[in-house]
Amino acid sequence: MEQRTIAAIATAMSPGGISVIRISGPEAFEVADRVFRSKKAGKRLCEQETHTIHYGYIFRNEEMIDEVLVLLMRGPKSYTAEDTVEIDCHGGVLVTKRILETVLENGASPADPGEFTKRAFLNGRIDLSRAEAVMDLIQAKNEFARKNAVSQLNGKLYFKIKDFRDMILDGAAQIEAALDDPEQISLEGFCEKLDQDLDGICIGLDEMLADADNGRMLAEGIRTVILGRPNAGKSSLLNLLAGQERAIVTEIAGTTRDTLEEQILLGGIGFRLVDTAGIRSTEDIVEKIGVSKAMEQAENADLILYVVDGSMPLDENDEQIIGMIQDKKAVVLLNKSDLPLYISEEELKEKTGKKVITVSAKEFTGFKRLENVLCEMFLHREVQYNDEVWITNIRQKENLRHARESLQLVRESISQNMPEDFLTIDLMNAYMELGYILGEEVEDDMVDRVFSKFCMGK
Ligand code: GDP
Ligand code: ZN
């Protein structure tokens, strides 16, 4: 099938210094020649060296659209591994659109979102883990996410998975060979050796899986829900952490009706803070919606910040919250410590079984300690940005888990002295599952799904 030549605006659609229109495919150079006129008369882009830059104008019929620089990259040395032309134009939105239209009128078709990166993948220049890293990099919201994406883009995940796969394939190949030629090749001691190798791989996979949740939280932000009875100081705390007046702080109990969300960074880690209506038993309908929402939000939180109003005795709302947070990751904030306290940090710790930090949202005290405790909780082992790959992607995590299960089956078969040919099926299943992470033999619609999440022009 003849590949289409595709084109799209590769830069953001807002006025800027320059914009880039990217053209990729077998006819990229011809299309560019139809719309471009060089300063030097008669110069044709098709005849120019690869990786050169040319100055001239874009013409739509006889109308000059813009003054541009054109970059030529012949495949396979380009982002897509195809012939690629990039037109740098003056950055106006209208100008950029006109140039794209002109390019489309002259033989290119509009690119789908992510199609350039998809082609890089389909043309074998990058594997799927690296293609996904491109998207992660674009969407990175904090330093952790950015560094992790770059590391994956450099093939860190690719090489790690590839090593595991090579070992698995070696094992399967040895079994096949021995079964084909039992007189020449013996499987004496083979199963012990294979079991050892698989043990090593399983440990590696377990580490990656254990880090996956941390990786996701670090990349997307730790979903943090602030709970506490009305007037405990939840909104004050949220505002303080977020550094702005975002939630409504009032003296009337129950004014925070809806939930608010705020992205913050503490010690380099991203937190997604959610403020909820105060939890309390009430007949008020509006308030009730807020309360059930708070419960719901807390159910799937990564972390709960439970705010206690220390200037008053604990009430039945507090008892309810304490019961609810028992099996959750939670930190208790003993707030209003500028006022005389009804309960001490020690007593509250005893009662909740959680870490308690005395703070005052009014006087900004105790927050450095909060930051330290949170960082410690989530970075129990130092994040080594560039040495480890963190799986942050649900698809990849599923594949890892399936591979791990198949290897476990192989090891069980070994311990039950099953015949060797029995092992190959599960070995090859693990091999395939790991292959999916790299995009080997994945179904077309899976590939489409991955790339449809990309932005236009990438
Ligand atoms: P929420 O209902 O839990 O969101 O509580 P708010 O943040 O709206 O605070 C309720 C009231 O308590 C407001 O009048 C705040 O100014 C006050 N407040 C919050 N934190 C403190 C604190 O640390 N000390 C004192 N003295 N008052 C506080
Ligand atoms: Zn509030």
Image (cartoon, rainbow, N blue to C red):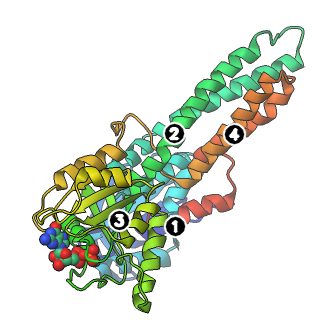
Cα separation, mark 4 vs mark 2, equals 14 Å
- Judge depth for marks 3 and 4 and give the one in front: 4
Which sits earlier in the primary sequence, circle 4 or circle 2?
2
Q: Secondary structure at mark 2?
A: helix
Badge 2: residue crowd in 10 Å (few <14, some 14–19, many ≥20): many
Under mark 2, the amino acid is Met
Cα separation, mark 1 vs mark 3, equals 13 Å
Q: Quadrant of residue 243?
A: bottom left
**Residue at 43% in and 45% down:** 153
Q: Quadrant of residue 209?
A: top right
> Which residue in the structure is indicated by mark 4?
405
Residue 141 point in image, percent of width and height: 33, 59
Q: Tell whether label 1 touches label 2 (CB within 8 Å).
A: no
**Residue at 76% in and 29% down:** 412
Q: Secondary structure at mark 3?
A: strand
Badge 3: residue crowd in 10 Å (few <14, some 14–19, many ≥20): many
> Which residue in the structure is indicated by mark 3?
87
> Which residue in the structure is indicated by mark 2?
208
- Judge depth for marks 1 and 4 and give the one in front: 4
Under mark 4, the amino acid is Glu
With respect to residue 122, does 65 lie above or below? Answer: below
Badge 4: residue crowd in 10 Å (few <14, some 14–19, many ≥20): some
Residue 272 point in image, percent of width and height: 35, 64
Under mark 1, the amino acid is Ile
> Which residue in the structure is indicated by mark 1?
6
Which sits earlier in the primary sequence, circle 2 or circle 1?
1
Which sits earlier in the primary sequence, circle 3 or circle 4?
3
Cα separation, mark 3 vs mark 2, equals 42 Å
Q: Secondary structure at mark 1?
A: strand
